[in-house]
Amino acid sequence: MSDMISKLSYYATFPFVRYALIVGILIALCSSLLGVTLVLKRFSFIGDGLSHVAFGAIAIASVLQYATESSFSELIDKSNQMIIVLPLTIISAILLLRTGQNTKIKGDAAIAMISVGALAFGYLLMNIFSTSSNISGDVCTTLFGSTSILTLNLSDVWLCIILSIIVLFVFVFFYHKIFDVTFDENFAKSVGTNTNRYNLLIAIIIAVIIVLAMNLVGSLLVSALVIFPALSVMRIFRSFKMVTISSAVLSVICTFLGIVISILASTPVGSTIVAVDVVFFAIFSLVGKIMRRY
Amino acid sequence: MSIVTCKDLTLGYETGAVASNINFSIDSGDYLCIVGENGSGKSTLMKTLLGLTSPLSGEILFEDGLKKNEIGYLPQQTLVQKDFPASIFEVVISGCQNRKGIRPFYNKEEKSLAMQNIKKLGIDEFIGTCYRDLSGGQQQRVLLARALCATQKVLILDEPVSGLDPLVTNEMYQLISDLNKDGITIIMVSHDINAAVTYANKILHIGHKIFFGTKEDYVHSKIGRRFLEQD
Ligand SMILES: Nc1ncnc2c1ncn2[C@@H]1O[C@H](COP(=O)(O)OP(=O)(O)O)[C@@H](O)[C@H]1O
Ligand SMILES: [Mg+2]
């Protein structure tokens, strides 16, 4: 035990460990906020589709970097990538929302096409243009998150902090509207709420969250980070407010634990966090069942 | 003085027309029941009145100072709500969303309006309960309280008693009738033709033949007699 603590405090002296914790906690906080909406509005498909699109966008970003500054390809900077990845993902979010709303079945097919297509093209692009000697390592990192602790520089951390603050602010400001369109879109529309506008807002926030969270857990595991905390606390809590607050708290706890465990056990950070999320989901389901019985 | 008038309305979706030649008008204080076979377009008419879908042709006039978004709405239950974690208060106060506008939080008046309607519908004893844990009848009351937060003028109810047991059904009809006596105009879709002729003062029958008129005329009309006998 003291061994673990000394190991942890030794690691905590490194700035990159502190950065990883700050960024991890912020991302966990943001990503859990829209979990309920995503699950209950049947928006999960957008979350899934988007994470694949974001993978393709990262591939495009690295290709563009290769084309423009191939001689400096050593300087692949994540925040530079973000400038390309974020708008591409937001645009895809809007497109997916449109197709998803128009015709149900065709919408699903379109989403499957877009997401699988983005995966294939992303991998293809990375293979053709990558200057890295370790392509499969890069791909694996993009899909599942980094294999060890995140290495972020200060500008990454700032970008993440700024985006998180924007997401938090927008969520709090539009909290009731998000409830209104999630709980009963038809009613909201009938009393004059511009539901299209708020659906769009939700889709954009989801896109930002996914791009943020991809840094932490990789594109394939993003949905887990968004959905698990909400699904867990929904087993126990009974109001939208409590579910929202407690899923944020749970998400932060899981992510913190996940990062710490990944440091101690030298496991991949993304899958460790998701594993912790799954364990807590099991615990909450059990507690929920017991509570319902008595 | 009529508050809503529909002229030569054709209802439908991109896929085609569902019902056509619909003409009727509603006066303030009316209790209009809309009856017809399954799939004849009753829900579509409700959605059209609410502006959720647009009519294929014809027009809907809102008169006498009634605004389109001043109509309260009790929808047929959607799947989403079945397992939604929301407290009764959260659901009811969402009826004030239009009143609130762009303000991020509800103010005192809106909160007390919500409480008032919760008490009015007799669900204040369940206030701490989750919406999804309520019985069907209680859920309908919650949604009705929400609709009352949105309007004091017109309520649209789409099959408000479907899935309720007979006792609760009668309570629900009584409640709606009381609201009508308080001066709220009721537009209700119903499966239950007997309830329609008991409580409503006007009937709109849609289907191959359209009937619109007072309850008394409907009972004596050919289309009404045939529909009543079926039951
Ligand atoms: N969103 C929709 N798009 C296309 N057709 C629809 C849609 N909703 C309902 N319909 C069709 O319109 C017809 C009338 O439906 P509806 O108004 O729900 O009937 P009712 O409420 O009288 O039972 C049905 O044939 C139904 O299949
Ligand atoms: Mg119907």
Image: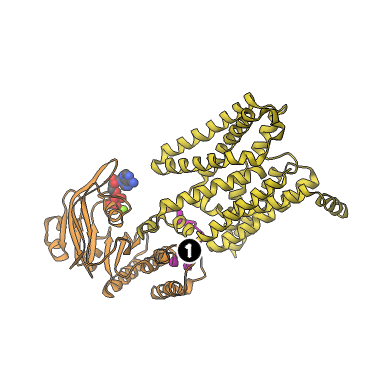
Chain colours: A yellow, B orange
Residue range in magenta is: B80-93
Q: Where's residue A205, x and y in %?
A: 53, 50
| Res. A283 visible in picture | no
What residue is rendered at 67% in x and 55% in y? A252
Q: Where's residue A135, x and y in %?
A: 69, 28
What residue is rendered at 12% in x and 63% in y? B217
| Res. A136 visible in picture | yes
Q: Which is more toward the observer, A186 or B180?
A: A186
From this view, report whether residue B125 is shown above or below residue B98: below
Report the side of B77 relative to B193 (left or right): right
- Disc 1 sits on a residue from what chain? B
Report the side of A32 relative to B42 (left or right): right
Q: Where's residue A264, x and y in %?
A: 80, 47
Dot 1 corresponds to which residue?
B131
Q: Which is more toward the observer, A276 or B6?
A: B6
Whether residue B88 appears in magenta in the rendering, the answer is yes
Whether residue A87 appears in magenta in the rendering, the answer is no
Q: Residues within 10 Å of mark 1 (few under 14, many from 20)?
A: many
